[in-house]
């Protein structure tokens, strides 16, 4: 348990929050922390974290799990900012919050707090070993976990205080610690740290694929579920942004995002509404059991164009992005687009069977991709399956 050391006395425009970066040895990449109570649409998760703090016995290992883009990482940083700050105390509503003007909060906003460690695969590009720097970023390398989690976790906190936690480690996209839960050397390497960390150490694994974490990892952690935002929370979030969107695009994005602000943003950045307009006429044909000759090719081309652009953007940022990982990300977005379209068909009895068939086709396509079938063939097979008579 992490305990206090002493008793508590288009024209489309996306406005980004300030991202904290430090390209030095302790690189951290995260948005400046928001208040834990300002995390939208996750009241149950925040309640669990508040109860943990109020007990003054915060567990040392956590898994924040749920769909992509619903606020898991944002909440992890917000919670870290609370438990690292000795000024954190109950407010008038009984919620534990830090003094926003405290020294610790200023350090966190500046990205210079020495005891908040954010572990991401992108840290590889700053590693002293050229092989690690040059490796394609498809997973979080073991060398990064050893340098940025295992080794610093064994050290005393740099700042001495009576905060709830002395050090916090956040592993983003923790499912990337290994490709397979049956061959998981990196996950196995952190087991001892998760089981017996030094007093005052809190480790948070953030993941959208909890099933890819070893059972032995999951059994050592407190689990906090994050869920898609409801429509009211999504609208509240959208109102904080400065999107300039056509009404048709806005409506489609709301449906596609399915309660995920992150997915909403990625859809804008990836031009997925354009994908929708390109393939929709062909998908209408497949709904009628008519095979569209161009659908598979078009889907494959759109994914390849997106993946190529994503890799080039990484090159500009100094990231050695994997084309394989890019293809998977792009294909996943196409699968999501097709599946989201099908889910609308589940609402009407007349289209339920076709919708279920479409979702089955998407699942088969995912399985093909996982067996390393080339994306263009996966998309051709998907297109053929979508128009099969049922």
Image (cartoon, helix red, strand yellow):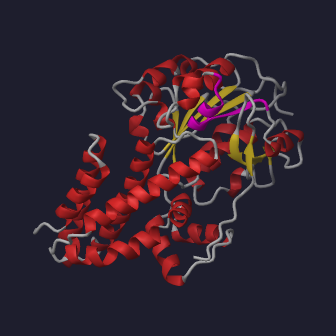
In this picture, is 279 found above or below 171?
Answer: below
Seen at 33% across and 59% down, the residue is: 300
- Residue 365 in sight: yes
Q: How many marks?
A: 0
* Quadrant hosting residue 203: top right
Seen at 59% across and 26% down, the residue is: 144
Residue 237, percent from left and from top? 63, 66
Q: Is residue 347 left or right of residue 142?
A: left
In this picture, is 135 found above or below 96?
Answer: above
Residue 62, percent from left and from top? 56, 34
- Residue 226 in sight: no
Residue located farthest toward the bottom when viewing the structure as drawn: 247
In this picture, is 215 found above or below 285?
Answer: above
Q: Which residues are magenta?
A: 114-128
Q: Is residue 1 left or right of residue 19?
A: left
Which of these two is toward me, 130 or 327?
Answer: 130
């Amino acid at each position: 348990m992490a305990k206090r050391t002493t008793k508590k006395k288009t024209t489309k425009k996306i406005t980004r929050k300030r991202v904290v970066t430090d390209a030095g040895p302790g690189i951290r990449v995260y948005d400046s922390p928001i208040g834990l109570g300002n995390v939208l649409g996750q009241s149950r998760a925040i309640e669990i974290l508040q109860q943990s703090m109020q007990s003054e016995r915060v567990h040392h290992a956590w898994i924040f799990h749920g769909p992509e883009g619903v606020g898991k990482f944002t909440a992890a940083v917000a919670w870290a900012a609370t438990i690292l700050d000795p000024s954190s105390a109950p407010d008038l509503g009984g919620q534990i919050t830090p003094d926003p003007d405290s020294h610790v909060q200023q350090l966190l906003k500046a990205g210079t707090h020495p005891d908040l460690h954010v572990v991401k695969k992108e840290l590889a590009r700053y590693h002293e070993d050229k092989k690690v720097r040059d490796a394609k970023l498809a997973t979080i390398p073991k060398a990064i976990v050893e340098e940025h989690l295992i080794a610093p976790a064994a050290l005393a906190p740099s700042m001495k205080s009576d905060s709830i936690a002395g050090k916090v480690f956040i592993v983003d996209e923790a499912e990337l610690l290994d490709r397979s839960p049956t061959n998981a050397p990196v996950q196995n390497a952190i087991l001892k740290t998760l089981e017996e960390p030094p007093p005052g150490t809190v480790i948070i694994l953030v993941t959208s694929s909890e099933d890819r974490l070893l059972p032995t990892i999951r059994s050592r952690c407190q689990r906090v579920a994050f869920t898609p935002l409801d429509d009211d929370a999504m609208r509240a979030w959208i109102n904080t942004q400065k999107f300039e969107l056509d009404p048709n695009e806005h409506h489609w994005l709301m449906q596609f995002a399915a309660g995920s602000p992150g997915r909403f943003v990625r859809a804008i950045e990836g031009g997925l509404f354009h994908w929708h307009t390109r393939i929709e006429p062909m998908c209408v044909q497949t709904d009628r059991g008519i095979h569209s000759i161009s659908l598979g090719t078009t889907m494959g081309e759109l994914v390849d164009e997106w993946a190529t652009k994503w890799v080039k953007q990484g090159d500009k940022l100094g990231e050695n992005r994997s084309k394989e990982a890019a293809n998977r990300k792009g294909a996943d977005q196409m699968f999501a687009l097709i599946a989201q379209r099908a889910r609308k068909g589940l609402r009407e009895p007349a289209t339920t069977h076709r919708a279920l068939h479409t979702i089955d086709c998407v699942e088969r396509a995912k399985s093909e991709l996982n067996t390393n079938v080339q994306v263009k063939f996966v998309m051709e097979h998907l297109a053929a399956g979508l128009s099969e008579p049922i």
